[in-house]
Image: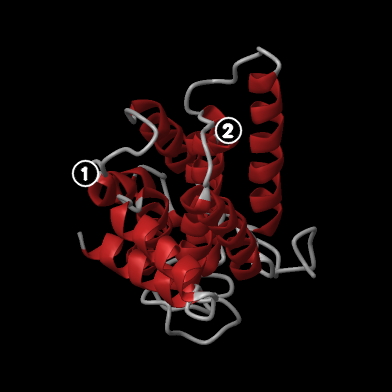
Amino acid sequence: MEAAVRARKAGREAVRDVAPDRLRERIHALLDESAMVPGVLALTSARAVEDASATGGAKATRGTHDSDGTGPGPVGVEERAAGVQLIYEGLRLTRALADEPPWERDPPHTDSNIDILAADVMVARGFSLLARTEAADKAVETVQSFGRDETDGQQGRPAAQHALETDVFELAVVAGTTAFGADPSDALLAYAAELAESLDGDHPESPEPVVDDVEQAVADAPDPRKFGPVDDPRPSATDP
């Protein structure tokens, strides 16, 4: 899938300066193994909104980004996709480490230590990429929700099975659609939630019809103008 390749390439590019080499290589491996669903959602949401606006005669209110992520503006679409994907991979890895604590095994824990660092780096870099976008506040909410769910799980109060995926997929469509000055429609948010519920396992394969289904969800809006304008990016809780 072309969108997955683009999202993976953007994710690798976003961590190109991470050191030491072994840590960067571990992050690359995690991205290579991933189905890249959040990144694909962000890219296809942006493209679908751009196309809907063009065919419906509605002009994006800001229009500062091209669908390939190379347009002018502070954060391109591919960088947004990378940010969402890195946050997801970091939180997913954290969840896996919490479910099977490596510190309960016999030493040495070299690989586990690398994973812990990789999780931290990916979430932090994802925040950095989204910090001055309209998706910044949603990114904060996603990590806060994850923290509450993990705390509840440790205390015997399990969260919804796909709570992380639901939050991240919503973050993805917010990051994608707002790149073209629009908020995600109800149909697109509903699709993101349904997709999260349909996934199987902690490290799912990418559902094949993601791109077509996102385009259909956007097309289901009665008029491209249904995608309301969003405010310009503003400093948020993710800012340094």
Q: Position of residue 102 (x, y in %)?
A: 54, 37
Work out which quarter of the rendered image holds the N terminus and state it: bottom left
Looking at the figure, which quarter contains the C terminus? bottom right
Q: Is residue 206 above or below residue 39?
A: above
Asked if residue 48 can be seen in this view, the reply is: no
Mark closest to the chain's N terminus, 2 or 1: 2
Image x and y of residue 11, in percent: 43, 68
The reply, left or right, for residue 162 in relation to residue 239 is: left
Residue located 27% across and 66% down the image: 5
Circle 1 SS class: loop
**Label 1, residues with CA under 10 Å away: few <14, some 14-19, many ≥20:** few
Amino acid beneath label 1: Pro
Coloured how?
secondary structure
Foreground pick, 173 / 224: 173
Q: Which residue is mark 1?
A: 209
Front one among 32 and 63: 32
Secondary structure under the numbered disc 2 in the rendered image:
helix
Classify 98 as above or below 11: above
Mark 2 vs mark 1, CA separation in Å: 32 Å
- Residue found at the far front of this picture: 107
Left/right placement of residue 44 relative to residue 130 reads left
Q: Residue at x 59, y 62 (%)?
A: 121
